[in-house]
Image (spheres, grey):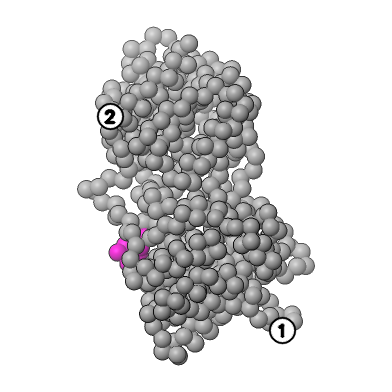
């Protein structure tokens, strides 16, 4: 059987693995929970700094001990921050490691500190502020602030109380020092265990790989497998039995694989639009493309289609040329309305302010075009651009005749951290007034995104917003590409009819 070496995340120690470890042992596996120095482990002599190298040494000591004992193959599991010392140790003992398991963690890169993987911008700023002071560590979260690190979905009150009571300050050096990798660990088999309650899913990883993100495209390899767990960021506490089963399967090489991108299988975002649309020519100016009705007589209403994201900066073609968006733009142009697509700068979850600025500039450019009726414009958002709706919901301009959104993200996903109140459609919708809203909801949406949609709808209904929901019961995220059936086609037609009605009333 395998020997599991378990490395815990920020502020936590070996105790978080107790229930999972017991189940692994009962299954005949060996288990070694690493006591990271300062995090439930030994304290160094006074005045000794604790940094990432200290924690890498802690993991190496356990790996070497297991190797000397002559046990089974070592499966190295890193949760959250723990993947950084785990990967650093695997890079130096690659010959001793059978598999690395990334448990709801990022993908650390050479030269990048662990702090870069912390999604919550406020927590990153607090860490840097603490580093500028005299302190050597970051205080652990209070009971109600663990959500800054990830979703607490599935945690009982008792588990959250224990997590808080046994938490340790995080030594600042462990977060600020760069991780040094030679590349040896990159050749090892790996398994990603994604917690869907924390906003992650295999479908999302596949989509990002399809978009051309280099670090994720490399995961479409036979030696890489994935599992999903329907829980929050601490599965060893919220689902220890399920996690133990998953780790045993991972050790056996099981799991789902990503589908490599090739010419015979275009990724979802590059598949043909599901409806026949007229061949309206594209006019490109800067970041903005216009599809002007050929038979237009005088200024026409316009619909601005706003792509989702985050989209890697290196993605080609860029979103304004994706068939879904050009399909919608040509479709409305066939109805006498100017269709607009654009590229905005949402390349990471830290880029929402830039994307909002790009969108505002594009809208003004469109409204200034003499072929556009500046008083009759609709905005139509997709997927991750849903958070950008907040600016327009909070202060709807009189020329905005309708706001639509397809399978939108309407609140930051738990693993995105906090983006501030500006990008909170749930809060902003109370000020939308009589602005007509159209929301196209995918019935088979991923759990994390579906939860944000339901939260938004609850807020919209509570304040009496004028909202119409178009349901696609058997549709997935980007249903126009992945579910091009008659139900999806009718949903697109119905949503377009509704938006155009509000533009022309």
**Vertical placement of residue 343 versus 221, above or below:** above
Report the magenta stretch's main SS.
Answer: loop
Look at the image and say whether residue 222 sits in the magenta stretch: yes
- Residues marked 1 and 2 touching at CB (< 8 Å): no
For disc 1, the neighbor class at 10 Å (few under 14, some 14 to 19, many from 20) is few
Q: Position of residue 409 (x, y in %)?
A: 50, 40
Q: Position of residue 326 (x, y in %)?
A: 35, 30
Give the residue drawn at x 46%, y 77%. Answer: 25
**Secondary structure at numbered mark 2:** helix
Most extreme residue toward the left, as rendered?
A: 264
In the rendered image, which residue does mark 1 sit on? 45
Quadrant in the rendering for residue 166: bottom right
The Cα–Cα distance between marks 1 and 2, rounded to whole angstroms, is 69 Å
Give the residue drawn at x 42%, y 62%. Answer: 192
Is residue 93 or residue 497 the one in the foreground?
A: 497
Q: Residue 486: which numbered mark, if any? A: 2
Question: The magenta stretch spans which residues?
Answer: 218-225
Is residue 254 or residue 91 the one in the foreground?
A: 254
Q: Residue 182: which numbered mark, if any? A: none
Quadrant in the rendering for residue 141: bottom right
Where does the N terminus fall, quadrant-wise? Answer: bottom left
Look at the image and say whether residue 451 sits in the magenta stretch: no
Q: Position of residue 129 (x, y in %)?
A: 72, 59
Give the residue drawn at x 32%, y 43%. Answer: 268
Give the residue drawn at x 53%, y 76%. Answer: 33
**Vertical placement of residue 47 versus 157, above or below:** below
Residue 408 located left or right of residue 140: left
Quadrant in the rendering for residue 193: bottom left
């Amino acid at each position: 059987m395998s020997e599991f070496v378990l490395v815990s995340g920020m502020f936590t120690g070996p105790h978080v693995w107790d229930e999972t470890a017991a189940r692994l042992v009962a299954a005949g596996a060996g288990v070694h929970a690493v006591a990271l120095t300062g995090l439930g482990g030994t304290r160094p002599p006074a005045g000794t700094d604790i940094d990432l190298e200290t924690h890498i040494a802690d993991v190496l000591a356990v790996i070497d001990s297991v190797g000397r004992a002559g046990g089974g193959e070592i499966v190295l599991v890193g949760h959250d921050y723990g993947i950084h010392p785990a990967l650093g140790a695997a890079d130096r003992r690659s010959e001793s490691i059978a598999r690395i398991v990334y448990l709801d963690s990022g993908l650390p890169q050479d030269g990048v500190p662990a702090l870069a993987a912390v999604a919550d911008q406020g927590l990153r700023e607090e860490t840097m502020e603490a580093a500028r002071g005299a302190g050597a560590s970051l205080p652990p979260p209070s009971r109600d602030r663990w959500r800054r690190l990830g979703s607490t979905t599935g945690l009982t009150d008792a588990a959250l109380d224990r997590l808080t009571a046994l938490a340790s300050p995080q030594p600042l050096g462990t977060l600020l020092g760069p991780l040094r990798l030679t590349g040896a660990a990159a050749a090892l088999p790996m398994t990603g265990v994604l917690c869907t309650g924390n906003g992650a899913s295999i479908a999302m990883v596949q989509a990002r790989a399809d978009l051309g993100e280099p670090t994720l495209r490399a995961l479409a390899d036979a030696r890489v497998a994935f599992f999903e767990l329907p829980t929050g960021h601490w599965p060893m506490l919220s689902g220890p039995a399920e996690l133990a089963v998953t780790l045993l399967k991972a050790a056996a090489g099981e799991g789902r694989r990503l589908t490599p991108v090739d010419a015979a299988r275009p990724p979802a975002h590059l598949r043909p639009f599901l409806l026949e649309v007229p061949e309206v020519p594209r006019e490109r100016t800067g970041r903005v493309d216009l599809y002007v009705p050929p038979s237009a007589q005088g200024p026409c209403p316009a619909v601005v289609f706003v792509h989702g994201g985050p989209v890697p900066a290196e993605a080609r073609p860029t979103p304004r040329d994706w068939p879904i968006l050009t399909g919608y733009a040509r479709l409305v142009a066939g109805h006498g309305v100017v269709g607009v697509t654009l590229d905005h700068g949402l390349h990471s979850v830290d880029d929402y302010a830039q994307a909002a600025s790009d969108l505002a500039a594009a809208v003004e450019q469109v409204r200034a075009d003499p072929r556009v009726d500046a008083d009759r414009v609709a905005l139509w958002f997709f997927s991750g651009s849903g958070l950008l709706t907040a600016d327009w919901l909070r202060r709807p301009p009189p020329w905005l005749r309708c706001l639509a959104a397809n399978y939108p993200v309407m609140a930051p996903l738990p693993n995105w951290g906090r983006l501030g109140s500006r990008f909170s459609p749930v809060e902003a919708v109370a000020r939308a007034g009589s602005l007509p809203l159209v929301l196209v909801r995918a019935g088979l949406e991923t759990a994390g995104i579906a939860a944000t949609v339901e939260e938004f709808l609850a807020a919209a209904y509570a304040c009496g917003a004028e909202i119409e929901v178009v349901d696609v019961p058997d549709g997935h995220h980007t249903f126009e590409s992945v579910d091009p059936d008659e139900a999806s086609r009718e949903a697109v037609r119905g949503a377009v009819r509704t938006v155009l009605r509000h533009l022309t009333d």
